[in-house]
Image (cartoon, rainbow, N blue to C red):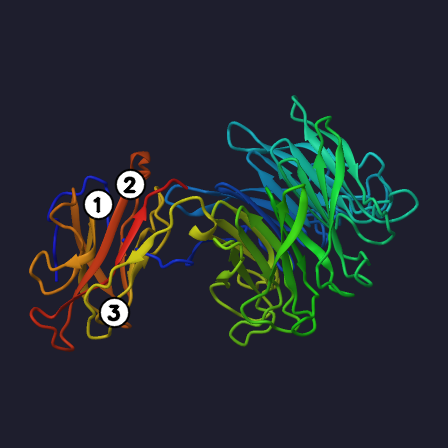
Amino acid sequence: MQLRLLVPLALGLACGAGAAAAQSYTLATLSPQDTSADDLIGSACDVSGTTAIVGGYGHDDGGTPGTGAAWIFDRVAGGDWSESVELQPADGLLSTRFGWAVAIDGDVAMVGAYRDDTLFNDAGSVYVYTRQGSGTWLQTGKLAASDATAGAEFGHAVSIDGNFAVVGAPGAKSGFETSGAGYVFERQPDDSWLEIAKLASDDNLGNDELGFDASISGSRVVLGAHLQDDNGNSSGAAYVYERQNDGTWLETAKLLASDGVASDYFGYSVAVSGDNIVCGAWLDDDFGSGTGSAYVFELQAGNTWLEVAKLLPGINQSNGHFGQSVAIDGDYALIGAIHQIVNFKLDAGAAYGFRRDGGGGWPLVQSYFYDDIKSDQNFGHCVALDDGVAVIGSSDNDEFAFNGGLAQVFYTYEGSSDPAPVVQGAGTPGCNGPQVIGLALPAQIDTAGFGFTCTNAPASSTGFLLVGNVADITGSDILGLGVTLHVNVLLSTPTLLLDFASDASGNGLAPVPLPNSPSLVGAVLHAQAVWAWSSCVLPPLNLSSSNLVSFTISAP
């Protein structure tokens, strides 16, 4: 069936489709051009807008394993992601585990090298890179602790938010104890970074490894101390610090799991976003050894923190290590389970998304897996979030080299400020039952791969796609075709009719590239599929129609 435009479409769309709530979209695979064996790319990652950074601390460009590297990827025209630069330290030091930790915010990136021996053995450092007006990245600084000591492992964790950054040093000394610390740096007018505070715990207990992980959001810092012993040996804790009006930083809270016990490693991973904190406890064994868990805390009146949820994967597995990595952005949390069994593949790994609902709960809404699931991929080694864009590392992935690793970029409306597509209406079922239409990729301008999907279509057939700007949720047979239409083709200005092809399994795909036209942002459109059948009788014209997907075009 070949059908053409009823009314010219002024939006410049070319062909399209929809997604049910809680669908995530795979946007890209991030793999450096020089990936080699044992690079462990995807062991660290971060994302800011349309720019991602991925660390591979095993990379050996200098010929020495463990030298490390980090790579920056940017979203390019058409919506793909491309490698922009490989970051390496200007001083050429070897075996520093450069890339163990990475962070990016806007035009600033930081890379941790916790085994840097420049000052003392394993004292550690962090390298600072700044994007220039030309788009190139230059190393513009190197950070070290003002009180550096051997074994401090400064750079084991790093996080940036605006003009402030925090660096974790789990082996740092506070007083006479090797309890760990965090260091806060502030960006100066000349773009240098000045250490302004050293964060230690008020209880200052030895061997807690405070700063094993670190996160900053606005004037708040969270440091993980997974070996802290309040709930038993290595039960773990997290510490919250706030910037005061006079510029000093004070510890304001100590977070413990309400059901914490020995060897949970609570605080192994931490993340903060505004008034929400998530802490991973990757060895929590409530449902088997090493099942793992994560805890969400919310700020209450009086500046106190309340544990509001304990997060678990959809399937609890021994040694799945859920909570190995955590990220949070607003009301959406992402948790990595690095050793989860997926489709009977050991240590394939997974990540799980949780969203705060209207009742204050944090239900599981999404599961993320690598496209080609295999054993020992360690998918979920790192996770990062920014306004619906998620980056998930697969550090032992063999796709491009043995244990070379990679990361994948996903998009989810669940974690975005953009309006989510809405699937509604019933349509008219076909011979294979009801047909569900959805979006193939997020409805964002400059997305060459945008389009529409449809299930239960006739096999190897061509139907048509209706797109308009006026919906009829109840539906009617407005054209006398014997099917319910939810796009009001008479009132829409304009209405588009395009071919909608299906494969041998009855899965439809209608590509509709979205141009890079800012004038489209904010447009609300509605789409529906109509199919012709020969495998059964559907009076009067053997036609069926899908339900309706309504979506808003946004900017990436």
Looking at the image, tell me whether mark 2 or mark 1 is earlier in sequence order: 1
Instruction: Provide the secondary structure element on which disc 3 rests.
Output: loop
Q: Mark 3 belongs to which amino acid? A: Pro
Structural distance between the alpha carbons of marks 2 and 3: 28 Å
Q: Residues within 10 Å of mark 1 (few under 14, many from 20)?
A: many
Looking at the image, tell me whether mark 3 or mark 1 is earlier in sequence order: 3
Rendered position, 44 above or below 445: below
Give residue 174's position: percent from left, percent from top.
Answer: 87, 43
Q: Mark 2 touching mark 1, by CB under 8 A?
A: yes
Structural distance between the alpha carbons of marks 3 and 1: 23 Å
Instruction: Provide the secondary structure element on which disc 2 rests.
Output: loop
Closer-to-camera residue (480/303):
303
Locate residue 287: give its quadrant: bottom right
- In the rendered view of the protein, which quadrant contains the N terminus? bottom left
Numbered mark located on residue 407 in the image: none
Q: What residue is at 82 percent from the left and 59 percent from the top?
A: 229
Closer-to-camera residue (133/36):
133
Q: Label 3 belongs to which residue?
A: 434
Q: What residue is at 51 percent from the left and 51 percent from the top?
A: 390
Q: Mark 2 belongs to which amino acid? A: Ala
Q: Label 1 belongs to which residue?
A: 469
Q: What residue is at 69 percent from the left and 66 percent from the top?
A: 284
**366 to the left or right of 430:** right
Q: Residues within 10 Å of mark 3 (few under 14, many from 20)?
A: some
Locate residue 280: give its quadrant: bottom right
Numbered mark located on residue 523 in the image: 2
Give residue 410's position: percent from left, percent from top.
Answer: 47, 53
Instruction: Provide the secondary structure element on which disc 1 rests.
Output: loop
Instruction: Answer whether residue 382 is visible to the viewer in this image.
Output: yes
Q: Mark 1 belongs to which amino acid? A: Asn
**541 to the left or right of 411:** left
